[in-house]
Amino acid sequence: MGNFKDAPTRENLMQELTSTWSRFETYVTNLSESQRTRLKDAGGWSVKDHVMHVAVWEHAAFAMLEGKSKREELDITVEIWEQDDDPINAVLYERHKDMPWEDVLKTLKENHARMVTKINALTADDLQLPHSHYQPTSTQETPIIKWIHWDTVHHYDEHLTWIKVIVESQD
């Protein structure tokens, strides 16, 4: 989880979350309709598909903090969940690929706002509790803050990089 040895501090997480979110949201909202929907990457995903992917996984991270199963919250079968990420993401892509941009953007912003509200309600000590505290069936002892960082900060940056490749491919 993440590119750091130790769990980030609450303050560090919030600073990174704010800056990476701002970069991500600003970039995708300033794209043209054609850039968001017509251009595709090698896997056939548009910018809109990447944005929805980020929104869906942020929703799953929020559910995790609420003690809910990510798999159940995403409505993914056990068989698919037990595979790697690609089959899971393929199901999510198929489910949302026809969603209009306005709905994708609304979902992204709503899910992000809920996540930020949830993180702000947690104390620094809460964020250092192990994953297993929030997911009782888990044996993971990694602090939950690392999972949050991965599902937000890392995910925004990762997908922004891929989105920029799609947009720059039109040049």
Image (tube, rainbow, N blue to C red):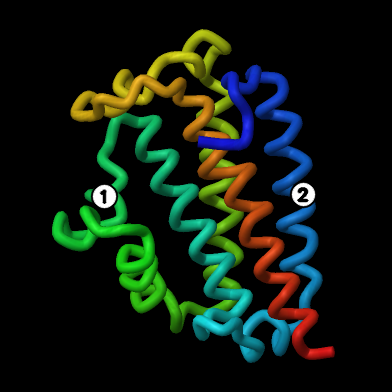
Which x, y percent locates residue 56? 45, 57
The residue sitting at 37% across, 59% down in the picture is: 85
- At label 1, counting other C-alpha atoms closer than 10 Å, the crowd grade (few under 14, some 14-19, many 20 or more) is some
Q: Element at badge 2?
A: helix
- Quadrant in the rendering for residue 159: bottom right
Instruction: Count the numbered circles shown.
Output: 2
The residue sitting at 78% across, 64% down in the picture is: 27
**Viewed as shown, does residue 56 lie left or right of 39?**
left
Which x, y percent locates residue 9? 65, 18
Q: Amino acid at mark 1?
A: Arg
The residue sitting at 62% across, 85% down in the picture is: 37
Give the labeled residue for mark 2. Answer: 22
For the residue pair 134 and 83, the one nearer the viewer reads as 83
Q: Which numbered disc covers residue 71?
A: 1
Q: Which numbered disc covers residue 81?
A: none
**Viewed as shown, does residue 148 lie left or right of 88?**
right
Nearer the camera: disc 2 or disc 1: 1
Q: Amino acid at mark 2?
A: Ser
Q: Say if 105 sits above or below 33 in the image.
A: above
**Viewed as shown, does residue 55 lie left or right of 165?**
left
**Viewed as shown, does residue 167 lie left or right of 52?**
right
- Quadrant in the rendering for residue 93: bottom left
